[in-house]
Amino acid sequence: MSANVESMFYVRETPWHGLGTRVDAALNSKEALEKSGLNWKVIQKPIITTTFDPISGYKANIRDKDNKVLGVVSNRYKVVQNSEAFAFTDALLSEGVKYETAGSLQDGKKIWLLAKLPDKYIM
């Protein structure tokens, strides 16, 4: 089974697939975005045919750092940037949240993050 890992970081033990960058301690959101390789944005562009006719109702999600197509979505699709996902977790758990792993799979088509709760939340 392939891991499909494009980029990631982890704390403590090396994952079963042996991929990623090991760090000594859990990171804050800014550090985690950098170490995981998720410091890129998704931009949406219209789709056109080879005869330059626009395809209405759909857009391409493209990674800004290398113009890699991540997928085709309807016009109703709302992009959640990687930085927004980290900011949401930061706001939800407030001060003290640390990230133990984060990364991207399938050439950036899927991302994940795992946060450690601050001790005040653990009973």
Image: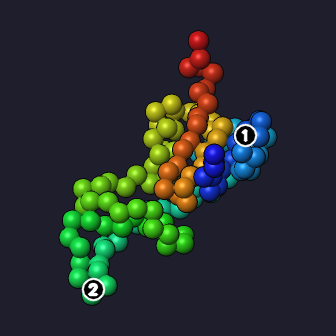
Q: Could you tell me if residue 36 is visible in this image?
A: no
Element type where label 2 sits in the image: loop
Looking at this view, name the residue that lies furthest to the front: 1
Up/down of 123 relative to 99, above or below: above
Up/down of 120 relative to 73, above or below: above
Say which quarter of the image contains residue 28: top right
x%, y% of residue 14? 77, 40
Q: How many marks?
A: 2
x%, y% of residue 47? 31, 74
Q: Which label belongs to residue 52? A: 2
Which is more N-terminal, label 1 or label 2? 1
x%, y% of residue 20? 71, 50
The residue located at (61%, 26%) in the rendering is: 118
Say which quarter of the image contains residue 34: bottom right
Q: Amino acid at mark 1?
A: Trp
Residue neighbourhood size for the residue with mark 1, other residues' Cα within 10 Å, grouped as few (<14), some (14–19), many (≥20): few
Looking at this view, name the residue that lies furthest to the left: 56
Q: Amino acid at mark 2?
A: Phe
Describe the colour scheme in one phrase: rainbow
50 or 92, nearer to the observer:
50
Say which quarter of the image contains residue 17: top right
x%, y% of residue 67? 49, 73
The residue where tag 1 is placed is 16
Up/down of 28 relative to 92, above or below: below
